[in-house]
Image: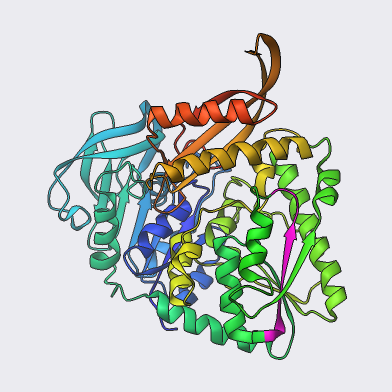
Amino acid sequence: MEREMIIVLDFGGQYNQLIARRVRECNVYAEVWPYTKSLDEIKAANPKGIIFTGGPNSVYEEASPHYEKGIFEIGVPIFGICYGSQLMAYTLGGEVKTAPVSEYGHTDIVTDGHSRLFHSVSQKTSVWMSHTDYIAKAPEGFTVTAHSKDCPVAAMENPEKKFYATQFHPEVMHTEEGQQMLRNFVLDICGCRGDWRMDSFVQTKIEEIRAQVGDGKVLLALSGGVDSSVAAVLLSKAVGKQLTCVFVDQGLLRKNEGDEVEAVFGPKGAYDLNFVRVNAAERFYEKLKGVEEPERKRKIIGEEFIRVFEEEAKKIGTVDFLAQGTIYPDVIESGLGKSAVIKSHHNVGGLPDYVDFKEIIEPLRMLFKDEVRRAGLELGLPEKLVFRQPFPGPGLGVRIVGEVTAEKVRIVQDADYIFREEVRKAGITRPNQYFAALSNMRSVGVMGDFRTYDYAIVLRAVNTSDFMTAECTNIPFELLQKVMNRIINEVKGVNRVMFDLTSKPPGTIELE
């Protein structure tokens, strides 16, 4: 598929995938590349533009990530964000110093009203700052196009060479007119057509899979979630009965979910798939015994998944390919180049060093969650399945803080079922994702005149458009009270219920 591309060059920023996501909202394809990619590789990709991400380092320190000056000579527009703006200034002869006053959070800036980057943007607008260094002096040939109370160079540009930079983050939703700024860069300054569409992706991907697989056999890790379900139908359309879907019930699913997945994809379901269900709860519980650290749990769950798949593959016969519903945020959050690892996903960062398959196929690897949903609709999946609540690959293993046991799984399953049931009955559709998690906190309570010493359940409900940023949902207090009463009365082992108000960032959507 012939397409225009924007390269998002990652210098360790936590918002790197969000930048790519915002570019794709302009119907322009974008990929996140580590800053370790060579200049020759960047030139070969023939990008329409390059965006430098933020990062946690100080650009004037020797150990900080840098890029060769030649990138500014390849003739494409470049947009530096936060650390990326400081890197641009530093590399091109400006000065970057420790800021007299650090800025973090909502900040009002004033723009000069003439920059193409700020076309159709209010002269005074609210942005999201996150920096302790600042550009003390812009490089030669640059003009300052925005400032704040404490940041003299909130934005700068060299329009002749098409270099633009902002100290703030236009990609986060907290920057009120950030998407307009990114649209201005991608569509106006870079001159992109904005014609990247999902229907062409689906057909192209089916053809790619057929060419890759040939007459080989494919084993898909089917969880029943949105990602693996879309992957299953996409693969089925590409290779038909060469595909076998293995559903591992690892004992960490939501209440009744194993039976629900089998009802959809099993022999009596709507799809003509080779379907195998493996009940492996005890096996996973044994592996997780005594493990409390979240990353270790993810790694253990990921490796055990692979081992189960290998065993099932041997029962089927020669299987050449392992398929997974990996999506782009999984890839980036699991660590890309030198960027920070937010969390390992069992189907990316959780893979063991040795995997007994010829190749791994990840047909959705370059898509964000809402793009996966659009692909699902394009493939003819029912809306009920496409828009179901997302569920983490490691399952309740990351909704139980501390050690995972069968008893804790029962507690969180029952509490989650009550919460979801009451939200559904109340007709509330606003939370994009909501669930109950189990904290590792135990506290004293009183029930029926007796002292209790039980666990605290944490309720979580968020609104998000892309699952990379999220805000807490305002659930009516009366509903929360009803859920709390039901959980405490109906779920043995719980005497306290709390509601998590944290946004993403600084938190993640899941509790661990």
x 70%, y 10%: residue: 451
Residue 87: percent from left, percent from top: 42, 48
Image coords of residue 314 (percent x, y): 87, 74
Was residue 66 drawn as part of the magenta stretch in this picture?
no
Figure check: 345 above or below 364: above
Q: Which of 422 and 83 is in front in this view?
A: 422
Up-down: is 338 above or below 187? above
Which residue is most to the front? 448
Give me the residue at 47% from left, 29% from top: 482
Is residue 309 something one can see in this rendering? yes
**Which residue extends farthest bottom?**
215
Query: With respect to residue 476, does 236 lie above or below?
Result: below
Quarter that holds the N terminus: bottom left
Magenta span: 241-252
The total of numbered circles placed on residues is 0
Tell me if residue 251 is in the magenta stretch: yes
Location of residue 157 in the rendering, given as x and y in whole percent from the top left corner = 26, 53
Image-based side of 200 in relation to 335, left or right: left
Front residue of 477/233: it is 477
Is 302 positioned to the left or the right of 29 in the image?
A: right
Where does the image place residue 253, in percent across and percent down from the top left?
A: 67, 50
Quadrant of the rendered image containing residue 271 = bottom right
